[in-house]
Image (tube, rainbow, N blue to C red):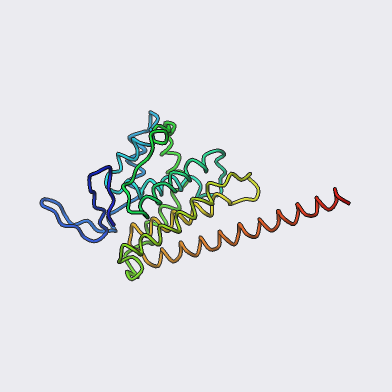
Amino acid sequence: MKFFRRNEPITFEMEPNHSPGREPISPAQLSLADELSALGARFAERPAALGEVFDSLGSRGSAILVVLCALPFSTPISIPGLSTPFGFVILLLASRYLMGLPPWLPGRLRRVQLPAGFFAKLIGASSRLVGWLERHLRVRWKALTNAEWKLRLHTGVVILSALLLMIPLPPLPPFTNTLPALAAVVITFSVLKRDGLGVLAGYGVFLFTVGYFIFWGEVVIQVFNKVYSMLAG
């Protein structure tokens, strides 16, 4: 998968990559936990601008930032006010990749400040999920991840998940942030690891999410109709 930052091409390779003086890099060596730990140490005592975080992630910045923006909502904990801007970051990065454009964040988003210790708290809240994904995702079912158009197709589902995450909903019904965020995390992380089975699991989470939203949408419509009937009659 190729990403571009500004006008400079940057290659993101999940297959072994050989270059002078470097050992081959394999998917198993790419650790999200290590990325989080490094960010936690770097920004332990000072706020972090979103643009600074993005730049520090290097060639994997686009995909990793998608995961980082979705992780806070991947647990059954409500984080009021953040699902819409974080969902927009996911939407923007995934959409630009889908269209073959360089990863880019507008200045207003780059200046968004994450509080000191944000990544330490994120590690604590998501350690079980990240650890489970690290242990179970691996290169397999390559037929689902061995072509650029397939990766773009998977990115389309991440975009749809971001749109659901951006909907400003009240804390009830529950899990309206958790489910779309989890779908984005599983699919993006599975693509990073080139795990076709993981991608299918992410599709399953997404389809369940769509059904969940439809169910609650019908409940709200029925309640509204009953209230309207009572007031009209």
- 152 on left or right of 7: right
Q: Which residue occupies the extreme left position in the image?
A: 20
Query: Residue at image x 55%, y 59%?
Result: 209
For the residue pair 51 and 179, the one nearer the viewer reads as 51
Residue 58 position (above or below residue 16): above
Residue 49 position (above or below residue 208): above
x and y, in percent, of residue 5 in the image: 28, 44
x and y, in percent, of residue 44 in the image: 38, 32
Q: Which residue occupies the extreme right position in the image?
A: 233
- 117 on left or right of 38: right
Q: Quadrant of residue 196?
A: bottom left
- 191 on left or right of 115: left
For the residue pair 58 and 230, the one nearer the viewer reads as 230
Query: Residue at image x 37%, y 40%?
Result: 105
Q: Quadrant of residue 119?
A: top left
Query: Residue at image x 16%, y 54%?
Result: 23
Quadrant where the N terminus is found in the figure: bottom left
Q: Which residue occupies the extreme top position in the image?
A: 46
Total tally of numbered discs in the picture: 0
x and y, in percent, of residue 60 in the image: 30, 49
For the residue pair 201 and 227, the one nearer the viewer reads as 227
Residue 187 position (above or below residue 4): below
x and y, in percent, of residue 221 in the image: 72, 55
